[in-house]
Amino acid sequence: MKRTILILCCIFCTIAIYAQKETNWWYFGSGSGLNFNELSTINGVENMPKAVRGPLNTSEGCFTLSDSGGNLLMSSDGITVYNKQNQQMENGSGLLGHSSATQSGIVIPKPGSSTEYYIVTVAVRIGENANAKGINYSIADLSANGGLGKITTKNVQLLPSPLDENIAGILNANGKDFWLVHNTGRYFYVWAITAEAGFSATPQIYDIGFTPVIDASAALGTLKFSSDNTRFARPNYTGKQMITGFFDTSTGVVSGVKTTNLASISTKPYALEFSPSGEYIFYNTSESGPMYRVSFNDVRNGLFGINTTLPISNVQLSPDGRIYGIKINTSTLYVIMNPDEGGTDIRTMDNFLVANAGYGLPTFAASFFNAKPVSPKAFTCAGYAAKLSIETSFAGIDVPTYFTWDFGDGSSLVTQTFTAGTTTYTQKHTYDTAGTYNITVTPYKTGSTMLADKVVTFRANIVNCNIVSNRMIRDDMLNTARMNQNQ
């Protein structure tokens, strides 16, 4: 006998990783910047960020950080740290980065703290002398000076010069710690950053098995990771190569490193960015050389990609999922509208910025607190407990202390404590009446401070199994409900 059960499919409202606001402020170039909190339609393109003036005057390296509400926390060129009011932070001068380093530094939330941040700086390679101090970290405490912050620890060396001009911060798979990654020549250096030990005393070192062309300018170029932190790419500027590989966020292991010869392109590769899915790479060549686009798999198979002919000097993934580009010594902004579709739609916004760009755009550790629903079973029978779950990741910025669950049926809210290192949170709830119910999970930082942009909503489909007259179908449905309850 043919049996058909018609049920209402569950509908889920997921939260995209690029909805996070910790990257909403960008400062770069000769006092230029973008504010993704204020959006408007410009030249027919909706939701364009506002061009703003910033405190930096940097030819290349720069980095900024905001909180989960999009409020600016700090910015820097690697030498001076500016607070949220764009004034020099107390004790915030004399850091050992350099505005002419490709990536002069990065801000990483200090695990176990809600107010302290590691500022990791990178020295310049070209023109370095015996006084160059390599990679160092300082600590900013934003609880000081009424929230304006203070540098409480300064210039602790992690790696001496000579080194290359790149840095990356990666969220550990445990959801609470970090990895710091640097590539110099044939070696990758990986530090663990934990609440218990801070930076590991010595980094893990991975030999990629070849020595790139060695000269001072070989040190140039960005090190970028895909949004899920599992893929990386880095240009070898002088050698005209693209170095790619894989990263294990649980162990910090670098693996599968390959190099692609880009000798047939006209100029040297300098900066790059991944599309949101990590499938595509967009890379720029020296000065105002053209931007190329290529899939991650194709570049690993020896292809250098498609020349867009656009004179883009650097690119950066934005909170809206687009990729934005700049051209050195101009106020032009480029917008890659569809990076996950190959980046064929690129808009040019002449005279957009309030001041000229340099070579650099801000470096971010892109993994911040994020929550999404776990797909429940297709349905649960009324009178049986439905299993409802969310998965979380976080990186120390506005981390919640608890969640509230609203099951959408008028029952009392249920409070669940947030525990560092725990990534899945589950509740079981019994619905007495059939229907489709909206579940809302709301994270709170302290007291009644809601993290409004992190709220998770999804639906549960509850059916009345008793109305089915065919006993065999009814038994199947009830068995499914019991299975849901037991899992």
Image: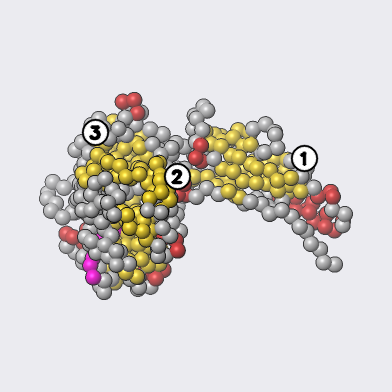
Residue that numbered label 3 is attached to: 88
Residue 391 among those drawn in magenta? no
Q: Which amino acid does label 3 sit on?
A: Gln
User: Image height check: is 54 above or below 329?
Assistant: above
**Residue sitting at x 38%, y 36%:** 71
Q: Name the image quarter holding residue 390.
A: top right
Specify which label sits upstream in the sequence, 1 or 3.
3
Specify which label sits upstream in the sequence, 1 or 2.
2
Distance, label 1 to label 3, CA atoms, is: 59 Å
Distance, label 3 to label 2, CA atoms, is: 26 Å
Q: Is mark 1 on a helix, strand or loop?
A: loop
Residue that numbered label 2 is attached to: 20
Magenta residues span: 266-271
**Residue sitting at x 56%, y 43%:** 456
Q: What residue type is labelled 1?
A: Asp
Residue that numbered label 1 is attached to: 432
Camera-side residue of 96 and 315: 315
Indicate the position of residue 268 as horizontal and vertical percent values.
23, 65
Q: Which amino acid does label 2 sit on?
A: Gln
* Residue 83 placement, left or right of 403: left
Work out which quarter of the rendered image holds the N terminus and state it: bottom right
Indicate the position of residue 12 as horizontal and vertical percent values.
61, 50
**Any part of residue 304 in sight:** yes
